[in-house]
Image (cartoon, grey):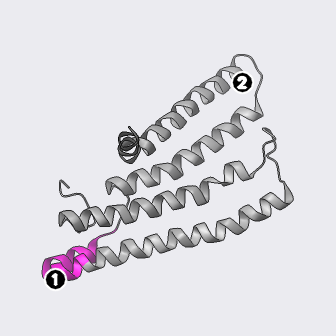
Amino acid sequence: MFRKLINWADQWLEEVLVSIMLGLLVVFLGCEVFSRFILSKSFTWMEELCRYLFIWGSYIGIACAIKRKEQIRILCLAEIVRKHYPNVAKGMYIVSELCFTVFCLLIVYYSMGMMENMMRFKQVSGALEINMIIPYSIIPLSMLLIAFRSLQRVYKDYKNGTLWYTNQED
């Protein structure tokens, strides 16, 4: 049972989370538009909640894109190297993914200092009046997830012999 749950989370966790967040975003924004233009009443808490849902959905969506190899890349130099030196291109892929992982882990490290300050000074949001550590916690959480997905992608590609920047169907 636990193994099935882990496999499901590995395949679908980000997609489900992003779908829920974007669905809620659409519902809340629709309600806000209705209340603003039909009822002539605006809810600031709804706007703030939508902002946080959008940000969280975007950050988790990055992990989803990494998992599927759908992130934006500029591959001009890599394509040239791949034509003439395929093994060097595979090494470039591994090095670039490891550099990206290190970058994500640096963001985690430095964002933890920011989180520490937020716990110490207890800043709250304007409309929802929640501790700002909640919306800002997406930074270290998503960067850990992105680093994990990046390393997982390199491992799977190495195991399958598909060390390249894009999916083989592309």
**Residue 167 rendering spot, x and y as whole percentages:** 23, 57
Does residue 54 sit above or below 74 in this rendering? above
**Residue 8 rendering spot, x and y as whole percentages:** 37, 41
Magenta extent: 74-90
Side of 10 relative to 58 (left or right)? left
Side of 82 relative to 124 (left or right)? left
Query: Which residue position holds label 2?
Result: 36
Residue that sits furthest to the right in the current view: 121
Helix, strand or loop at label 1? It is: loop
Query: Which residue position holds label 1?
Result: 85
Q: Quadrant of residue 37?
A: top right
Amino acid type of the residue tagged 1 in the rendering: Tyr
Q: Residue at x 32, y 57 (%)?
A: 69
- Closer-to-camera residue (8/35): 8
Residue that sits furthest to the front in the current view: 1
- Closer-to-camera residue (106/43): 106
**Residue 108 rendering spot, x and y as whole percentages:** 59, 66
Side of 63 relative to 42 (left or right)? left
Q: Residues within 10 Å of mark 1 (few under 14, many from 20)?
A: few
- Gap in angstroms between the C-alphas marked 2 and 1: 60 Å
Q: Residue at x 58, y 69 (%)?
A: 107
